[in-house]
Each structure stands twice: as structure tokens, then as C-alpha cells.
Image (cartoon, helix red, strand yellow):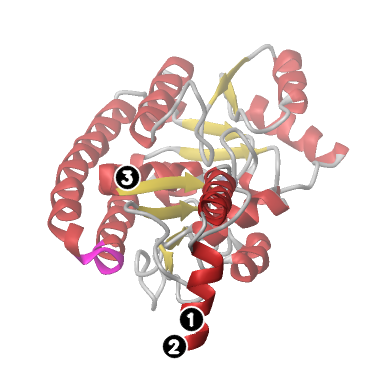
Amino acid sequence: MDIYRNFKKTFCETWYHKLCLATVISVILVLASAGCVSLEGRTAQPTGNKVKALATLSVLADMVREVGKERVEVGSLVPVGRDTHTFQPTPRDSLKIREADVIFFNGMGLEVPLEGVIKGAMRKGVPIVVLSDGALPQEGNTGTDTEDNPHLWLDVRYAIHYVERIRDALATVDPKGAAEYEANARTYIGELRELDRYIERAISSIPPSRRKLVTFHDAFPYFAERYGLEIVGLVLKSPGREPSAREVAELAETIKSEGVSTVYTEPQFNAQILELIARDAGIRVSTLYSDALDENVPTYLVMMKYNVEKILEGLK
Ligand SMILES: [Zn+2]
């Protein structure tokens, strides 16, 4: 007690030291508000009032936003307009990852190149929710050869599965918000069911012999299967690998023999090759969105409607 009393006497009982102490506290507060000093610990506690969610793709982030609404702050790791399959995170992204209270993956191999960085930077105990888990039957064959393709969300029925998993994950991370997440998901799933019916009707209005798609990368097999289209050609056989001269020639031949009238690029790729093929064949070039949203197509719902319009315009 004596030591404390002496300290109190010598340090606090003059106006000069009071001023000093006030100055030190002000400096700390200014530095903290400027982000120079972190007052947050390095623990797995949520970092603010809102739940911070991070999704790998902008398309998935939009779904999380629809379910989380104002209780959740959502970011995406792959920036809008970038190719998901070849994206490399930077040290800046590590900060985003470290702040997240819950992380959403698509799964089916899509995040393999990102997994090391994410697991290295995330806080201990933060859940990674794989949205495609449980979407496809674990046993037996679905009758397609698309099991290894990660682009499930382009079939709206799988998007509904994603939304259900997002709802359940947010309710686990933030149980107080469970009723809100449930209500938001119900509304959103209603809109998605309507979207699914709309796409079905729209595509069935195209004559069957014209329902042929040539796309840039292999993102549309689930979409094609669900809505009755056939993928007849692709520019990129595998992500990040340019097609050989022989593959380009084969694709040009397929486009001619199948009587394709429009080919589809995607905004995140340089489409020069496909544009050249189309020019030679005298056919149209149009655009479809798959993995990445942008300012023209800011949500999943808008993206899907945009794609359907472009398919009707190009194939009908
Ligand atoms: Zn993709």
C-alpha cells in the first residue's frame, strides 16, 4: 500500500503530471482511431457488433449478404471481375481473412490454391463452411460427368442449397440472429424458386436444335443440364492454360458443324481467341457471367437474369 500511496503522491498529485497522463491517453486514443495501435487482442472473439463474414467468390458473398442483411458485414476474397481459378491472395488479403468470424468456401476443389493462405491467416476457431457439401449425392452416379466441376451455383436449385447452409452457419456463429437469418433466407429462397421457374420457361422457348452453348471456361455444365442446353465447345479446357493451335482449330470446326450462331465470352477473361474464331465464322460474340460479379451485374439474381437474356438473344 505504501508503494502505491507513494506512487500516487509523486505521480498524480501535481497538475503537471495530470496533464502528462491526459496527453498520453489522448495520444493512445488518436493512434488507435487512426489504426496505428490495435486495441483488439489476437483472439478469436468477433471483432465488432456485426458478424464479419468472408466468402471466397463475389457470387457467394452476395448470397451471404441476402441472408445476413444488416447483422452481417460481408466481403469476398477474390475481387469483382477477377478470375477465381488463378487468383493469388496478397498480404493485404491476409488482414481480411484474419478479421473474419466465419469463412464461406464453395468447395469441390475451387479453393485449393487459396486454402494455404486462408488457413495460415484466419483466427483460431473460426469456422470454414463449405457450401457445396451435401449438394450432390455422395454415392452412386448423378448420370452426368460433372462431379468434379465446382460451378454448382449456376443451377438455381444448388444455389438454394447454398442459402440453406449459409442460414444454418450464421445461426451457429450468431445464435441471437437465428430468427432473422431464417426469415431472410425464406424470402430469398422464394425469389430463387421464382428465378428457377423463369429460367426453365425462358430456355424452353428456344427451339431444341438451337440450344447449343460455346463458352469460355467450363462453368456451365450444371446450368446446361438443369435448363436443357448442350455445351458444344469451350475455349479453356483447364483454368490458366491457353488453348493450343490445334484446340482452336477444332473449336472453330465444331462451331461450324454444330451451326452455332453465338459464342459466349466471360468478362474476367481476355476473349481475343474466341472473337477471332467468331469473326472468321461470321457469328456473334456475347457475354455470360459465371464466377465473378461486377458493377453491371451486382447480384446473383441480376447475373442469372442477365445470362438468360443473353442466351435468348443469341440462340433464339
Ligand atoms: Zn469458374
Q: Residue 172 appears at what percent x and percent y?
A: 27, 69
Which residue reaches farthest bottom?
1
Indicate which label's residue lies in the foreground, 1 or 3: 1
> Mark 2: few, some, or many residues within 10 Å (few <14, many ≥20)?
few
Query: Between residues 150 and 252, which one lies in front from this camera angle?
Result: 150
Quadrant for the C terminus in the image: top left
Q: Which residue is located at x 57 percent, y 51 percent?
A: 16
From this viewpoint, is residue 147 visible?
no
Q: Is mark 2 within 8 Å of ligand 1?
A: no
* Residue contact at pointers 1 and 2, CB within 8 angstroms: yes
Amino acid tagged 1: Tyr
Q: Which residue is mark 3?
A: 156
- Amino acid under disc 2: Met
Q: Amino acid at mark 3?
A: Val
The residue at which mark 2 appears reads as: 1
From the viewer's perspective, tell me whether residue 250 is left or right of residue 16. right
Of the 4 image quadrants, the one containing the N terminus is: bottom left
Q: Magenta residues?
A: 171-175
